């Protein structure tokens, strides 16, 4: 019979969870996390202490155990010695400090799943529930649960408590029943767990990551990658199914896979309109009744071409006229998105993305809770990377205070 080790296993997990939190906290505060490429788990090397052990040394030794000198080939205390011969020849006659080590060795690693990272993030930054914060909907899915009871079924589904109750009722109903008498279940007393169809709420999400890969973002790619990985972990914690799509854009927008998105590949100009147009196209592939939509946008702030002018022809009083209307593709995205998360670094343009978002909120105050934008009007290299990452995540996923915030105010 196997031993019940649930209590010991639970205690072990509590201890390892505390150790994992300490390791993640150290790497997050130092900004040294290497984002995994093509794998779900994050692997971090563990510090290792090599245990001492005895080793056999067959070099000749002297009478008192000292290693022999190279010239005499004899240990100290044997043979003729010269004036000034050192007695401590533990390094084969070599003195001074040793050099650097060489070669390689195997390291121990500890793996962190996205669930581990999300739990740590929740405790570290005291984040509220994501679905409650952004009012995410859910769908009803049919499922089977063993909530019903039946008189027939396999032995593995015997409901012992109900079976005993039926046996007891039968025994008490017998005129010859004596209190305290042992009641043995009969065939008609057995009750079995039976499946019952129910409707359970289930939430799904689509996350579209869109990244500006123009030359001006080269220095902040690592910052973007860290934010992206933690965001993926946090969203996945709150949804049964998460679909992630990735878009890169410079002058042209293209959908890429996850590995390509995490690569450092920056250069060229910027056309934010092309990136937002691709986001809109992807978003329209999913029904708002089945999925909650989140858009995560990394940019240098250049939004000069977002507002496009569409020309159209019309006739008035028998004359052919041409007019133009300014069109913002971001408006269509915000109509169906639960939230737009923006990370703007290097915002030194005449018309920044954060300024565009602020003006849209003024025109439509209902957009305020659907936009979380952090803006850093300088290079990220001027600040501590770990501080930028934690403050960005805290502002994005924390309780609502304001829609657009300067990162300088958060990190100072």
Image (spheres, grey):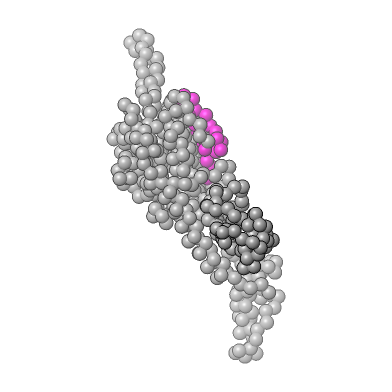
Rendering coords of residue 218 (x, y %): 45, 32
Location of the C terminus by quadrant is top left
Whether residue 392 is situated above or below residue 93 in the rendered picture? above
Answer with left or right where residue 175 lies relative to residue 32: right
Location of the N terminus by quadrant is bottom right
Answer with left or right where residue 331 lies relative to residue 253: left
Question: Which quadrant holds residue 378?
Answer: top left
Q: Nearer the viewer, residue 202 or 388?
A: 388
Residue at (65, 86) in percent of width and height: 182
Answer with left or right where residue 70 lies relative to residue 332: right
Q: Which residues are magenta?
A: 242-262
Q: Nearer the viewer, residue 242 or 72?
A: 72
Rendering coords of residue 307 (x, y %): 37, 25
Q: Nearer the viewer, residue 73 or 81?
A: 81
Question: Which quadrant holds residue 63?
Answer: bottom right
Answer with left or right where residue 370 lies relative to residue 285: left
Can residue 67 be seen at all in this image of the molecule? no
Rendering coords of residue 254 (x, y %): 52, 29
């Amino acid at each position: 019979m196997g031993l019940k080790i649930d209590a010991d296993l639970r205690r072990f997990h509590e201890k390892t969870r505390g150790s994992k939190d300490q390791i993640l906290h150290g790497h997050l505060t130092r900004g040294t996390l290497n984002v995994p490429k093509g794998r779900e788990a994050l692997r971090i090397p563990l510090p290792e202490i090599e245990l001492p052990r005895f080793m056999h040394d067959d070099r000749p030794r002297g009478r008192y155990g000292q290693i022999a000198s190279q010239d005499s080939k004899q240990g100290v205390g044997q043979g003729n010695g010269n004036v000034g011969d050192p007695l401590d020849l533990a390094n084969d006659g070599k003195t001074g400090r040793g050099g650097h080590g060489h070669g390689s060795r195997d390291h121990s690693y500890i793996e962190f799943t996205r669930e581990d990272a999300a739990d740590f993030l929740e405790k570290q930054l005291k984040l509220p529930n994501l679905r409650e914060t952004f009012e995410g909907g859910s769908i009803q899915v049919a499922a089977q649960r063993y909530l019903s009871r039946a008189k027939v079924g396999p032995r593995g589904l015997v409901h012992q408590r109900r079976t005993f109750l039926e046996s007891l009722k039968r025994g008490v109903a017998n005129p010859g029943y004596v209190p305290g008498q042992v009641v043995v279940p009969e065939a008609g007393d057995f009750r079995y767990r039976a499946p019952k169809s129910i409707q359970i709420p289930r939430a799904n999400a689509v996350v579209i990551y869109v990244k500006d890969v123009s030359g001006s973002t080269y220095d902040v790619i690592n910052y973007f990658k860290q934010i992206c990985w933690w965001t993926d972990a946090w969203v996945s914690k709150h949804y049964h199914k998460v679909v992630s799509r990735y878009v890169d854009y410079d002058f042209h927008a293209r959908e890429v896979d996850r590995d390509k998105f995490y690569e450092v590949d920056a250069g060229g100009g910027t056309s934010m309109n092309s990136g937002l147009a691709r986001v809109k196209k992807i978003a329209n592939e999913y029904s708002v009744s089945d999925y909650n939509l989140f858009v995560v946008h990394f940019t240098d702030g250049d939004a000069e071409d977002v507002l496009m002018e569409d020309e159209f022809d019309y006739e008035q009083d028998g004359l052919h006229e041409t007019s133009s209307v300014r069109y913002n593709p971001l408006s269509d995205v915000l109509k169906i998105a639960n939230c737009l998360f923006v990370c703007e670094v290097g915002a030194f343009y005449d018309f920044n993305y954060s300024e565009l978002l602020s003006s849209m909120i003024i025109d439509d105050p209902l957009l305020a809770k659907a936009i979380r934008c952090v803006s850093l009007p300088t290079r990220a290299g001027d600040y501590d990377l770990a501080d930028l990452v934690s403050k960005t995540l805290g502002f994005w996923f924390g309780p609502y205070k304001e829609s657009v915030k300067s990162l300088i105010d958060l990190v100072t």
